[in-house]
Amino acid sequence: MVDLAAIRARHAASPFLAACRGAPHDTVPVWFMRQAGRALAEYRAIREQHTFEEVVHTPELAAEVTLQPVRRYGVDAAVLFSDIVTPVQAIGLDVTIKPGVGPVIDRPLRTTEDVARLRRLDAEEDLAHVLDTISLLVEELDVPLIGFAGAPFTLASYLIEGGPSRSYSRTKALMFTDELTWHRLLDRLASIVGASLVGQVSRGASAVQLFDSWAGALAPEDYERFVLPHTRRVLEQVGELGVPRIHFGVDTGELLGLMASAGTEVVGVDWRTPLDAARERVPAGVGLQGNLEPAVCLGPFPQVAERARDVLRRAGGAADHVFNLGHGVLPATDPGVLAELVQLVHAEGRVTPADTANTADTAGTTGTTGTADTAGTTNTAGTAGTADTADTAGTTDTPGTTDSVHQHDHQEEQR
Ligand code: CP3
């Protein structure tokens, strides 16, 4: 049996978990998407002996590969080693991960009959190997473990296209020609992904990240109609477990408000949207993760340092900032650069106490305080993104929305 209370107690002082909740802490936490993997020689050594799937299916190996970047970089969180397609592989789809390409599937899903091939996932049974990896990890780790899954849209894009895509034309074709099948497919994927995340948390993951990596291919209105309801259902299932949720996508500058409205503690921001601009699009009470351009890390460290400082400056010492790259670590990255980057964030990333107090106030979604004086100004909150969010979440009048005004006012004062 997993003693979840003991795990929670062990990480009570975790800056990463505090930042996810906008709670007081001193130092900006940092981890990297795709921190495990080919940038590390010790990962490549294991991959010379084993396929990707073998690593994922062998808890000792998967745990080792998860721990490698924690040792090397000194990051504030570990991220479970598996893949977004692991749950659909586990229910019998013929998906394989092709090195240098990504997930590919021999028989793509494009019709109602194809969708029927997606059966329910029983996490304890179908993902026993993944959950056993978590059990090994929580014994070993001093930092919280992040569980993850691919969001229904991103997962669907691989399953429909048959592999990675530039245009997502088959995916969009299904969306626009057969809406019923589309929603059936996303509904099934939402159940699978939700079950996977719930399983990961119930075995000891302290936070989760939902990767909707390719959602940025969609116009906001299409995202809202075809994707958001399914993603929201996934995040709601996890929300009941009380762990912080991070919702991330690439090229989602125009979707940030909608992504926040899906129900998440933190929105991940890619490098195209500066964090101060992202702050205007995401309501207060929802934190930000990001967003150093990953390719900057291919260059010399002084340049990395300068750009990392810019990220910290734009985050403004907010208590709800988790430092990360804007997308995954590129395989050609020098691990020494990432180790130095972690040191820099820890040395220079100071949380501003005033902000800490303010964000802590507003982080709780129950927030009944501080709304009276700002309530009348909801419509001046600024960006269309924020207004959209309020609309679509059906929460126009909630404290969260007015709190966002409060937060923006507060930030204006600080500038
Ligand atoms: O360190 C970590 O972040 C945890 C492990 C992790 C992997 N995949 C391991 C992996 C995570 C979180 C993922 C998520 C994932 N997988 C996403 C979302 C993140 C993102 O990048 O937006 C996506 C889109 C995938 C699909 C996928 N799987 C791709 C694009 C690739 C890379 C293909 C390649 O070879 O370039 C994979 C394979 C994969 N997943 C590798 C790793 C370490 C490389 C496999 C190898 O060793 O050859």
Image (tube, rainbow, N blue to C red):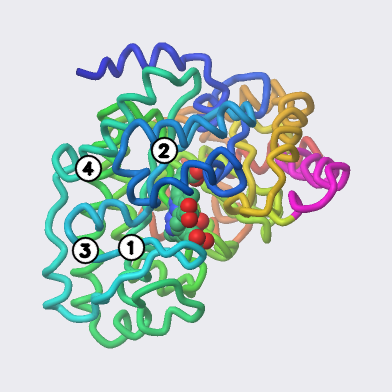
Which amino acid is tagged 4?
Leu
The mark that comes first in sequence, 2 or 1, is: 2
Residue where numbered disc 3 is placed: 93
Which mark, residue 310? Answer: none
> Which residues, given as a range, are shown in magenta?
296-315
The residue at label 2 has a CB less than 8 Å from ligand 1: yes
- How far across and how far down the image is residue 23, in percent? 54, 23
Check disc 3 and report its element: helix, strand or loop: loop
First along the sequence among labels 4 and 2: 2
For marks 4 and 1 on the same chain, the one whose residue lies earlier in the sequence: 1
Type of the residue with mark 1: Thr
Q: Do residues under tags 4 and 2 come within 8 Å of each other at their CB atoms?
A: no
Q: Position of residue 362 (x, y in %)?
A: 52, 31
Which residue is tagged 4?
127
Q: Secondary structure at mark 2?
A: loop
Give the camera-side residue of 414 and 305. Answer: 305
Q: Residues within 10 Å of mark 2 (few under 14, many from 20)?
A: many
| Disc 4 versus disc 1: nearer the observer | 1
* Disc 1 target residue: 96
Residue type, label 2: Leu
**Which residue does the image show at 23% across and 70% down from the upper left?**
183
Could you tell me which quadrant the C terminus lies in?
Answer: top right
The residues tagged by marks 3 and 1 sit, at their Cα atoms, a distance apart of: 9 Å
Q: Main secondary structure of the magenta part?
A: helix
Place of residue 11 in the rendered image (x, y in percent of width and height, measured from the top left): 46, 17
Marks 3,4: beta carbons within 8 A: no
Q: Characterize the local packing of mark 1: few (<14), some (14-19) or many (20 or more) Cα atoms within 10 angstroms.
A: some
Q: Which residue is mark 2?
A: 80
Q: Quadrant where the N terminus lies?
A: top left
Q: Secondary structure at mark 1?
A: strand
